[in-house]
Amino acid sequence: MSTGAEISVAAANAGELNKPKPRWMPLEGNPEVLNKYLKNLGVKSDDYEFVEIIGFDEELLAFVPQPVSAVLLIFPITDEHEKHREKEFEQAAHTPPDYSQAIYFLRQSVGNACGSIAVIHSIANNLEKFQLDSHKPLAHFLETTKLMTPEQRAEHLKHALDMATANDTIAEEGDSDVIDRDEHVNLHFVCFVNVNNELYELDGRHPHPIKHSVKIQPEQSLDLLRVSQF
């Protein structure tokens, strides 16, 4: 399987450098849409679903079903955030990455795909909790890319037509007006996950996973919510 994946990436790289970046239709960030998207991808689970976090006060967190396996944060991209991101990139360029090799991380190379990438991160780093339909897109994508680098996975996603179709089909079903794939969207998704009792922020625009200096106890899944707030 790894040999085939390498051949696929090599073929994708040949002659692609000057082509414009592909763009998907942006996902709407509401739980109903995201849960439909999980089914489109082939995620089978009666125990887990996306729910809205309406606040970080303790009484509001108590309404979030337990256990929590991942948190998706959706936020507007501002000038302040971009400056902060540039500083992170600068630091990352001079600092060896510090993260567990157990983490599945995917760089973003497809425009408007941050929602899909956040969903992929949430499932790929919790595979022991889910069944994946082997005939649906996500199982095939994860199996094909499991030995790839984050950059190779990003390149592979650019050519994964079944993943693009699963995204665009759901993007047309949201409550908001459908946004054209070529339109600029200033909202961004990132995913927070607990890997080996450590909190990681997975942002496809970043060179590598961001490990936060927080320990999460296995029996305290609400900690994932508490420490992932900004």
Image (cartoon, rainbow, N blue to C red):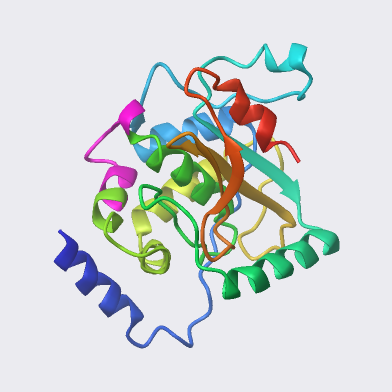
Residue 72 in the image, given as x and y percentages of width and height: 60, 38
In the rendered structure, the answer to whether residue 132 lies left or right of residue 26 reads: left
191 or 201: nearer the viewer: 201
**Is residue 130 among what the camera can see?**
no
Residue 34 in the image, given as x and y percentages of width and height: 54, 34
Please tell me whether residue 42 is drawn above or below residue 4 in the rendered image. above
Residue range in magenta is: 128-141
Please tell me whether residue 9 is drawn above or below residue 137 in the rendered image. below
Quadrant in the picture for residue 225: top right
In the rendered structure, the answer to whether residue 36 lies left or right of residue 59 reads: left
In the rendered structure, the answer to whether residue 75 lies left or right of residue 130 reads: right
Residue 160 inside the magenta-drawn segment: no
**Is residue 174 among what the camera can see?**
yes
Q: Which residue shows up at 29% across the image and 57% down it?
A: 145
Quarter of the image with the N terminus is bottom left
Q: Which residue shows up at 28% across the image and 43% down it?
A: 139
Q: Which residue shows up at 24% across the image and 50% down it?
A: 143
Q: Which residue shows up at 34% across the image and 45% down it?
A: 138
Residue 134 inside the magenta-drawn segment: yes
